Image: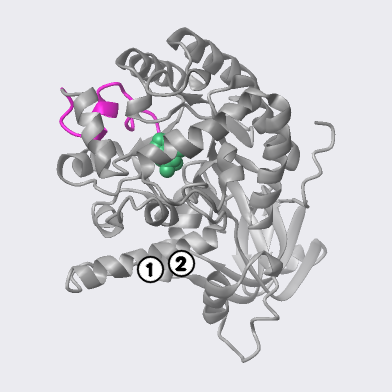
Amino acid sequence: MATIYKGNILFTKTQHQFEIIENGYIVVEDGKVVQVYTTLPTAYQHAELIDYSGKLIIPGMNDMHVHAPQFRNLGIAMDMELLPWLQNYTFPEEMKYADVNYADKMYRRFIKSIWKVGTTRTVAFGTVHKQSTAHLMKLMHAAGLGGMIGKVNMNRNCPDGLCETVEDAIADAQELIDVWDKEDNLVRPILTPRFIPSCTPEMLKALGDFAMSNNLKVQSHLSENKGEIAWVKELEPESTCYGDAYNRYNLFGQTPTLMAHCCYTEGEELELMNKNQVFVVHCPTSNCNLGSGKSPIRNFLDKNIPVALGSDVSGGHDLSIFKVMVYAIQVSKLWYANSDKKMPFLTLPEVFYMATKSGGSFFGKVGSFEPGYEFDALVIDDTELNHDNYTLLERLERFIYIGDDRQIEHRYVRGKRIDEPTFENV
Ligand code: GUN
Ligand code: FE
């Protein structure tokens, strides 16, 4: 049974331009887009039509890097760089997640908030705690939102309360994939070594082997901060670059891999990311707040390295991927100015593509309205912002720059309307 959605349709097939269909129709069947039309074929005349005439229909947002257990620290603790920030603010908060009741309370708030800002798929770090992380997956599933959730792995340079053994890490990972790693699951696990300083060589080897033998995706942090990079050089002296420290353990694109930040990636690391098609997850709000640096996104695009966007809460202070798009453009304009205009700044279709089809490709056919794509969508009622006959593209740009969740009227994931989570039966 097809369902037809009518409205002003905007999406990006490529990073170069928007597809814009004024008062068009999206035909959806079994949660997937069949086709987008300017006039509805007669074959669909009697199908159910949901009329969002005058409103904007765009793909849902993919937040490809966020720390769910850092939600309490959102908007505070911005006075330190990465390494002391982790020790003083982040690890103490994450230790609280040994208590599943605390995790339950906070993860419900977190999920309601990502729902609110229009994020339909999320790749999140949990904590080292298996039970709380499994609970986060249950809550995401109950909310009907999609994503990948990582139980964090760490066994060095962390407080006792966040330290695990290699044996426990592998046993826990096995348990989580046995329950959650099913082909059609909207919520799936992802292997999550925190970063090189948190994992001994034994841990990295065990995780790489585990990822390879279970074809499990991987996420971590890369080249975020200069002090961190120098520390990795000390810890892994044989590695030729930070990326190589992951690569030698099969944690760098041997299975699909997301690496957050990449502020200082160049040379060999850039080549390796290109060769292994490792995703850069650009987190510009976090990079500003932690004083980490500015990631040279244009270089990654020039090399055909896939780029997605992440809020990186609570290094980042805003869960809205729309706001992350704006920061991505602004940071790229600092590159532009500081390079004597040699490095072109990012355009609106480029950052929109990162947030939708590029990030979405990590999940499969997600993030576009082309045939066969899962229907993840937002319905935007921008009446309040559209007071002067703006074009459709201007309306979208205004919503991205100056809009907020008040204009998001509905969210869809895989063709299902997702209302505010109530977490029934959890
Ligand atoms: N590197 C290792 N852990 C973290 C974290 O929690 N946040 C950020 N931004 N970087 C990290
Ligand atoms: Fe992070």
> Can the viewer see residue 233?
yes
**Within 10 Å of the Cα at label 2, are there few (<14), some (14-19), or many (20+) other Cα atoms?**
many
Callout 2: SS: helix
Residue under label 1: 330
- Residue 160 x %, y %: 48, 17
For this view, does 383 lie left or right of residue 397?
Answer: right
Q: Which amino acid does label 2 sit on?
A: Val
Residue 350 higher or lower than 199, as above or below: below
Label 2, ligand 1: CB separation under 8 Å: no
Query: Element at badge 1?
Result: helix
Q: Mark 2 sits on what residue?
A: 326
Assess whether residue 173 is covered by the magenta stretch. Answer: no
Report the magenta residues as a range. Answer: 238-260
Look at the numbered discs 1 and 2 and tell me whether their residues touch, using CB distance below 8 Å. Answer: yes
Residue displayed at 15% across by 31% down: 240
Q: Which residue lies furthest to the bottom in this view?
A: 388
Residue 244 magenta: yes
148 sits to left or right of 415: left
Instruction: Residue at 84% x, 32% y: name it.
Output: 425
